[in-house]
């Protein structure tokens, strides 16, 4: 009888003892089920990703510059649906987030106007993300798409040069681009901006239509300059914002262009006393800018009579000599007294508002006067000796 009582007590106590164990086991199962995992994936606008019963669809890249995208997250066999604009590197919770059985999404990178990379956090029992193509992506789309091009009219730029910048925006899409604005690089310190800045284009561009803006600027400093990309922002018929940009441009600004005159002289060969000789003078511009108001002056170290200019002039002037250009002139001099006479040439000219001087020197030689009878002096002793020998010959003969 006592044994029966013990068995009954054991049966009554077993549910009480097993309940905590069952509860503990249940808690362990819940911890396994609620374990959070994260996965990264890339997809394009119009693509979707399956995560358990959740669906994540990339609607569009709103702005690459601002790091904004639009996504749609919904859950199969439920009323949950959430359309949202997300910002890169900021977590966004959907359906109360991963901690409560929903999703937590983060934009890691925006590659271009159609492709992004995301990270999803969710319960591990949802499995791996699986891509699919949405019905909206398979349907034909009417969307604007702008292409931006920025060009400069010259690449060989020196300080002080004027540069013309042209920005061309073309709608290559199949719908009208609305609220079009362009954001050019902020004024760069290496340039002084002239007419046309800041650039503006049409507010609306139809499919296939293009517009351009032109402005001018002057380089004011030397060095390497990087012109940032020109960004065009626009919207479609549903006011979704898009952006497009041009490649950046690198420009090297060289030192200021300056003229560089060189005086070249072709002096005469030594001239006889009382004779004449030509002098040819060439003025070359070896610089990369025009030389203006060129004045060449000659200084002859003579009394003015020993060596004088009898034809033409050693002085000359020119209004302009362009880069790589030259001017040639000549004069004829006469030497009245023997000797070597130095002549200095000085050229003064204007380049970029400042006066510059160059000079060179050369010599003109005048020979001594020639006396022809001097050539006969060596013959006279020979004649005398010959006459003496002839007389001696006659004397001995008789």
Image (tube, rainbow, N blue to C red):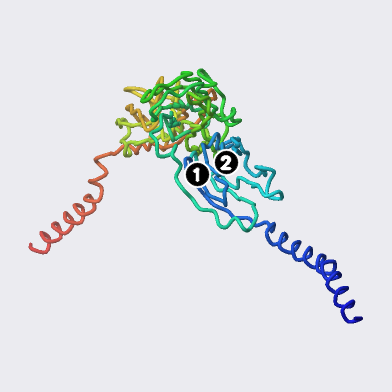
Closer-to-camera residue (35/253) = 35
Closer-to-camera residue (287/153) = 153
Residue 221, by quadrant, is top right
Query: Looking at the image, which residue sits at the far left?
Result: 398
**Residue at left 60%, top 50%?**
119
Residue 166: image x %, image y %? Answer: 44, 26
Closer-to-camera residue (381/353) = 353
Q: Please, is residue 91 above or below residue 242 in the view?
A: below
The residue indicated by pointer 1 is 115
Query: Looking at the image, which residue sits at the far right?
Result: 2
**In this rendering, would 25 be left or right of 2?**
left
Q: Secondary structure at mark 1?
A: strand
Q: Secondary structure at mark 2?
A: strand
Residue 303 seen = no
**Residue at left 43%, top 21%?**
205
Residue 285: image x %, image y %? Answer: 41, 32
Residue 86: image x %, image y %? Answer: 62, 38
Residue 323, by quadrant, is top left
Within-10-Å neighbours for mark 2: few <14, some 14–19, many 20+: some
The residue indicated by pointer 2 is 74
Where does the N terminus fall, quadrant-wise?
bottom right
Residue 108 seen = yes
């Amino acid at each position: 009888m006592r044994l029966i009582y013990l068995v009954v007590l054991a049966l009554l106590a077993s549910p009480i003892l097993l309940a905590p164990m069952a509860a503990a086991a249940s808690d362990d199962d819940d911890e396994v089920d609620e374990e959070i995992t994260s996965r990264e994936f890339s997809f394009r606008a119009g693509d979707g990703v399956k995560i358990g019963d959740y669906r994540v669809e990339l609607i569009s890249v709103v702005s690459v510059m601002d790091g904004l995208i639009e996504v749609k997250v919904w859950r199969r066999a439920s009323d949950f649906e959430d359309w949202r604009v997300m910002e890169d590197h900021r977590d966004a919770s959907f359906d109360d987030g991963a901690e409560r059985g929903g999703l937590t999404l983060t934009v890691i990178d925006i590659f271009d106007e159609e492709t992004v990379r995301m990270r999803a956090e969710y319960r591990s029992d949802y499995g791996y993300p699986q891509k699919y193509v949405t019905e909206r992506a398979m349907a034909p789309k009417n969307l604007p798409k702008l292409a931006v091009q920025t060009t400069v009219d010259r690449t060989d730029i020196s300080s002080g040069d004027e540069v013309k910048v042209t920005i061309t925006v073309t709608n290559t899409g199949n719908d009208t681009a609305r609220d079009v604005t362009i954001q050019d690089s902020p004024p760069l310190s290496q340039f002084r901006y002239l007419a046309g800045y800041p650039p503006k284009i049409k507010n609306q561009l139809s499919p296939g239509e293009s517009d351009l803006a032109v402005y001018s600027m002057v380089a004011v400093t030397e060095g390497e300059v990087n012109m940032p990309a020109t960004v065009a922002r626009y919207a479609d018929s549903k006011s979704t914002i898009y952006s497009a940009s041009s490649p950046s441009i690198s420009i090297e600004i060289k030192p200021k262009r300056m003229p560089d005159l060189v005086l070249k002289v072709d002096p005469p060969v030594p001239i006889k006393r009382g004779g004449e000789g030509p002098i040819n003078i060439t003025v070359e511009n070896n610089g990369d800018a025009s030389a203006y108001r060129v004045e060449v002056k000659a200084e002859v170290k003579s009394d003015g009579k020993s060596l004088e200019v009898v034809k033409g002039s050693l002085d000359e002037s020119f209004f302009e000599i362009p880069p790589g250009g030259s001017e040639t002139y000549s004069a004829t001099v006469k030497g009245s007294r023997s000797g070597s006479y130095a002549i200095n040439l000085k050229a003064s000219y204007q380049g970029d508002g400042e006066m510059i001087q160059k000079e060179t020197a050369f010599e003109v030689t005048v020979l001594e006067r020639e006396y022809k009878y001097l050539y006969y002096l060596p013959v006279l002793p020979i004649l005398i000796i010959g006459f003496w020998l002839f007389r001696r010959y006659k004397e001995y003969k008789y």
